Amino acid sequence: MTKKIAVFASGNGSNFQVIAEQFPVAFLFSDKREAYVLERAENLGVTSYTFELKDFADKAAYETALVDLLNQNQIDLVVLAGYMKIVGPTLLSAYEGRIINIHPAYLPEFPGAHGIEDAWEAGVAESGVTVHYVDAGVDTGQIIKQVRVPRLPEDTLETFEARIHEAEYALYPEVLRESRVVKK
Ligand code: GRF
């Protein structure tokens, strides 16, 4: 059976773009009205929705609206790609085991919002990229697939970061294919 995916993103959306170029995306959700990812969705002809936590009484009400959107669209897999919120109990209990995330480090090394910078500052010889299931923790869910990315002697933070992102653009589509999301 074809799996229907929705992508959640909060910012730039380069991972969303790579995914949407290869797979049918039922919709993009952004929790930031100003996010560049919304422009990308428009250019790619992908339906998008946006609302913000502050539009709601609390996070449970915000996530109830998200669960409604997912149910209405019969989404099988929620693909987080730079979605900068912790998934709360309302969304998690409705979709546990069906939410995946990409993290720009080799988990459990360097979890959190600054995986690339933290690895760089620690001076590691290699870091990586991880796709994992989302659970209640921060980047603690079961690992699906990960890849190592070396830090080269001539690297700057910028070139290191670019190599991490290139690895993301390869790994996320691989995981989606292996999760039986059918390509366009
Ligand atoms: C990526 O590095 C991803 O691993 C992290 O947030 C970043 C999102 O970048 N979770 P983009 O919005 O896809 O360009």
Image: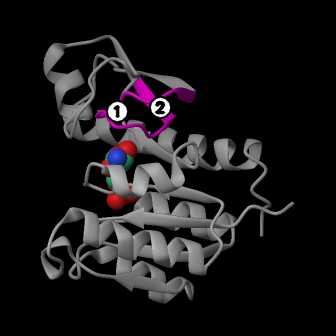
Q: Which mark is residue 99?
A: none
Up-down relation of residue 59 to residue 52 (above or below): above
Q: Indicate whether 156 appears above or below 148.
A: below
Residue bearing the label numbered 1: 139
Give the position of the N terminus as an image quadrant. bottom right
**For this view, does 145 lie left or right of residue 135?**
right
Q: Residue at x 57, y 73 (%)?
A: 71
Q: Is residue 114 left or right of residue 92?
A: left
Q: Residue furthest right?
A: 1
Distance from disc 1 to disc 2, alpha carbons, whole Å, reads: 9 Å
Q: Residue 181 magenta-drawn?
A: no
Where's residue 60, x and y in %? 26, 64
Please tell me whether residue 131 belongs to the stretch shown in magenta. yes
**Label 2: which secondary element:** strand
Tell which circle, 1 or 2, labels the residue nearer the N-terminal end.
2
Q: Which mark is residue 130?
A: 2
Q: Is mark 2 within 8 Å of ligand 1?
A: no
At a point 42% along the width and 64% down the height, the residue shown is 8
Q: From the image, which quarter does the C terminus lie in?
A: bottom right
Q: Residues within 10 Å of mark 2 (few under 14, many from 20)?
A: many
Which portion, as a residue range, is magenta? 128-144
Q: Hey, what amino acid is under mark 1? A: Asp
Point out residue 18 in the picture as x, y percentages from the top left corner: 55, 61
Please state which amino acid type lies under the numbered disc 2: Thr
Residue under the point 24% across and 41% down: 158
Q: Nearer the viewer, mark 1 or mark 2?
A: 1
Q: How is the image coloured?
A: one colour
Residue at 56% from the left image edge and 88% from the top image edge: 45
Residue 146 vs residue 86, the one in the foreground: 86
> Which is nearer the eye, 48 or 126?
48
